[in-house]
Image: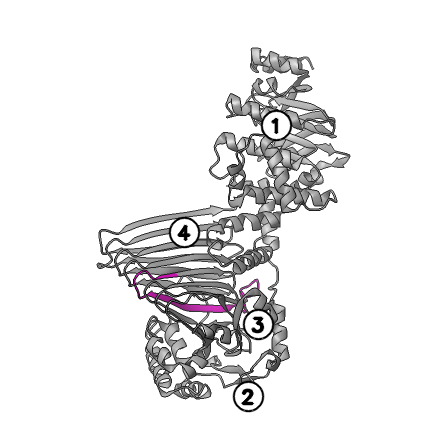
Amino acid sequence: MLEIKDLHVKAGDKEILHGINLKVKAGEVHSIMGPNGSGKSTLAQVLAGRESYEVTAGQITYEGKDLLQIAPEDRARLGIFMAFQYPVEIPGVSNTYFLKAALNAIRKERGEEEVDALDFLNLVKEKMELLKIDEKLISRPVNEGFSGGEKKRNEIFQLAVLEPKLAILDETDSGLDIDALKVVAHGVNSLRSKDRAFIVVTHYQRILNYIIPDYVHVLYDGRVVKSGGKQLAIELEKKGYSWLGEETVSAQLVN
Amino acid sequence: MPTETKQIQDLASQEYKYGFYTDIEADSIPAGLNEDVVALISAKKNEPEFMLEWRLKAYRHWLTMKEPKWPNVHYPPIDYQGIVYYSAPKKKDSPKSLDEVDPELLETYRKLGIPLGEQELLAGVAVDAVFDSVSVATTFKEKLAELGIIFCSFSEAVGDHPELVKQYLGSVVPYTDNFFASLNSAVFSDGSFCYIPEGVRCPMELSTYFRINAKNTGQFERTLIIAEKGSYVSYLEGCTAPMRDENQLHAAVVELIAHDDAQIKYSTIQNWYPGDDEGKGGIYNFVTKRGKCLGRNSKISWTQVETGSAITWKYPSCILLGDNSIGEFYSVALTKKRQQADTGTKMIHIGKNTRSTVISKGISAGHGQNTYRGLIKISKSATGARNYTQCDSMLIGDQCGAHTFPYIEIKNSTAQMEHEASTSKIGEDQMFYCQSRGLSAEDAVSMIVNGFCKKVFKELPMEFAVEADRLLSVNLEGSVG
């Protein structure tokens, strides 16, 4: 579904990603872990199409298409969704209105008919129950005055309604208490399917107790320094990230 | 340049959708202004003596005045002798029904999407259509007359109800008020008149569509609305204008009078030609709008959506004379291309326990300059007065400007004032968030801006709210994105 080859990314004058390689197949859950400043969020944002980053080398292929040539809104319409680390407030625009416009833009791309108000309401109800979302939340303006936890839950709610093929969770777990984390994880798990892939970007192993990944990749200083199964996450939790730095340095010396 | 900014600028060049010119033979007088012209206008309209006297007093006073220079707008000097002060579509007698109306005129209205005809009945809107300077069609008059409501052109009111005109004309905006109001008083051609008798709730939204046409014709409208004790009226005003090359001056005056327990809701959508990308050819919209809450518990509410004109200069205001009276001002002003707007309100608290609310939303895009100017005045007599003001500005792109000049004068220590202000920029973050959910850049901007204006739009009557939403989106396509 997704293949990243030797991806180099700059923000301003500084190179942040120094050659990332990653392959994600439909149905898989990949976790990208790493300390602060390792480039995790940069990778997530580049996948979603953020233009403040400059891709200087490498390529990203999504379902056989050159992703880097596709505008952000078209990526969304082709089934890519990123749950934001810091969801943005849009005052005066109701959550339902926003989401319905988004869903219809995506459906149009798929050649499907626009949903009418009634069908949309039913869909929203179903997903609200899944994510234990308060009905009041969805009639309020997008993220305006939401608590940190509400914002994160709202992101997963959008994910549930928009049903993307590739979902990227950018530190969705940060700032969530354990109950909220469980709700979010339950939502994600119920959305797992053989046609849908997840990339879970996180700093902590904690969320991976609830969303069991198929693969774990460790990002350190703009490179994937280690990849493995879910065991790797547990190892990281015990040892922290610093030992990886030493390992990379010695690996580079050997090369 | 970030892509969002570029997109916004690319989108900032859409053509004015209502730019066309209707070829109707106009009955005009030569350009220029003097006492003879004033007298000629009065004579052409078969006005009684008191009107001529009033016009001449206004004209003589106007000669002593200077054009105001304090607004934060810039334009080349206006040649007042180069303006044609009277132009009317050529018709011997007023039409009795739509069948008698010039078909070309009806076609113009059709292009503008104005439902003049059977649609009005369905829409429940009575339209007093002003084409150039003379009202050519007035509908629903009989229906309203059954309730004792008078809704007609100003000229008709002068002929049929001279005592009401004499009593109220200039009682809120005197002919000495300001440069443009004085000019209007001298030469005003026509407008709307509305009288709601005691205890009557007007069952439909009263609506007038203004349209400037005929080359070089300054449009000087005069509107007078009187709401007697315990009555209610909602009045809608909306405008578009054809494309043209020379600047057109529009100096209208609107006066509202609310007696005890009466309520007037006045809503405007203004979409006159804003000029081309260089700002050439747009309308100068210099308007004086003022309401007087004369009676106890009366209420006057102004709602405006200003998206057109090269220059907008208007401050719909309320004089809160009656105890417990309420004044409201809700405004959305959008400037793009080279548009300039200096707009806001004045709330003059005189009666006890008077209250006012001011919500202003300014949006600047392209090279647009948007100024909010507001005065809240609490007089010595206004014990227990309260005001809430919120004025927010939004900037789209990096070539535009937003300015705020709030004036507050308090002479009574019991007053309670609240003032909130903010300036925001449509951020890349908001744009990216919307786009990452599948919305196009254009839809994203339109959605963000409409959300920003929500508080004002919800004050508009239903049919206008839909139009406002659409209008803003159309304008954003052109100027914002």
Residue B457: say if magenta.
no
Amino acid under disc 2? Lys
Q: Are marks 1 and 2 in contact (CB under 8 Å)?
A: no
Determine which residue is flagged by label 3. B244
How far is the residue under mark 2 from the one under mark 3? 28 Å
Q: Nearer the viewer, residue B316 or B125?
A: B125
Residue B450 sits above or below residue B65 on the image: above
How far is the residue under mark 1 from the one under mark 3? 59 Å
Amino acid under disc 3? Arg
Q: Chain of mark 1?
A: A
Question: Where residue B262 sits: x, y (%)?
Answer: 36, 64
Determine which residue is flagged by label 2. B92
Q: Quadrant of residue A51?
A: top right
How far is the residue under mark 3 from the one under mark 4? 33 Å
Q: Nearer the viewer, mark 4 or mark 1?
A: 1
Amino acid under disc 4? Cys
Q: Nearer the viewer, residue B211 or B49?
A: B49
The earlier-in-sequence mark between 3 and 4 is 3
| Span shown in magenta | B274-300
Identify the element where label 2 is drawn: loop
Q: Are marks 4 and 1 in contact (CB under 8 Å)?
A: no
